[in-house]
Amino acid sequence: MKRLFICMAMLLLATQALAQGKIILDYKGMAFGKEMTDSKYMMKAREQGDLTFYTRYGEDHNFQGVPVKDQYYGYVGNKFCVAMFSAQGPSSYNALKAYFDANYGPARQPKVNVKKFSYDAGDVEIQLEYDDNTKVAGVSYVYTPIMRQVMTPKKK
């Protein structure tokens, strides 16, 4: 009886883990946490603190059938940790929201009156934002093991 209870508890935990959605290890073939190897395909766009953002030459400007723009790949210490893009219009936002809800389960939404959603995908957190005024949807993929290092206050 005790074994049955333990098996049922493990099955319940596994079901809950699966219900949270897919686990992401890469974005468009680029593995999170890995060093940049094909720098000839990357062009430095800007720096923001410890993060250096790049764009990719010959980039596919679609994500799940949604036309996207402003695609950036962020690196900390030459390790890939952030992917982000934006898309224009309510239909793009609705398509992205439907995709993320279907693949990653219910989102966390800190403020009800702001369309900002967070999804967990293993060590990667996906954030979807939509601005009703500008009609722009923004998406960020953040590799949390590296970002935690950046965000942790440094001891003096």
Image (tube, rainbow, N blue to C red):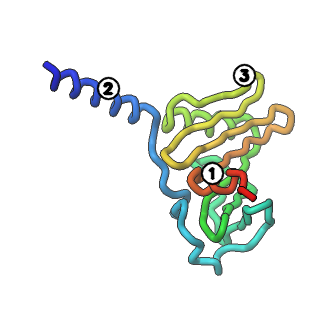
Neighbour tally class for label 2: few under 14, some 14-19, many 20 plus, Cα within 10 Å: few
Q: Helix, strand, or loop for circle 2?
A: helix
Seen at 62% across and 35% down, the residue is: 97
Seen at 58% across and 53% down, the residue is: 143
Question: Which residue is denoted by mark 2 in the rendering?
Answer: 12
Q: Quadrant of the N terminus?
A: top left
Q: Nearer the viewer, mark 3 or mark 2?
A: 2
Q: What is the CA distance from the residue labelled 2 to the residue labelled 1?
A: 30 Å
Tell me the kind of residue under disc 1: Arg
Q: Nearer the viewer, mark 1 or mark 3?
A: 1
Pick the front one: 6 or 28: 6
Q: Whole-percent x and y of residue 66?
A: 64, 47
* Upstream in sequence: badge 3 or badge 2: 2
Neighbour tally class for label 3: few under 14, some 14-19, many 20 plus, Cα within 10 Å: few
Neighbour tally class for label 1: few under 14, some 14-19, many 20 plus, Cα within 10 Å: few
Seen at 75% across and 57% down, the residue is: 70
Q: What is the CA distance from the residue labelled 1 to the residue labelled 3?
A: 26 Å
Q: Whole-percent x and y of residue 128?
A: 67, 40
Q: What is the CA distance from the residue labelled 3 to the residue labelled 2?
A: 30 Å
Tell me the kind of residue under disc 2: Leu
Image: 71 above or below 137: below
Q: Whole-percent x and y of residue 22?
A: 45, 43
Q: Is 147 on the left or on the right of 21, as rendered?
A: right
Which residue lies most toward the right here?
A: 133
Image: 10 above or below 112: below
Question: Which residue is denoted by mark 3 in the rendering?
Answer: 112
Question: Which residue is denoted by mark 1 in the rendering?
Answer: 148
Q: Is 10 on the left or on the right of 20, as rendered?
A: left
Q: Quadrant of the C terminus?
A: bottom right
Q: Helix, strand, or loop for circle 1?
A: helix
Q: Helix, strand, or loop for circle 3?
A: loop
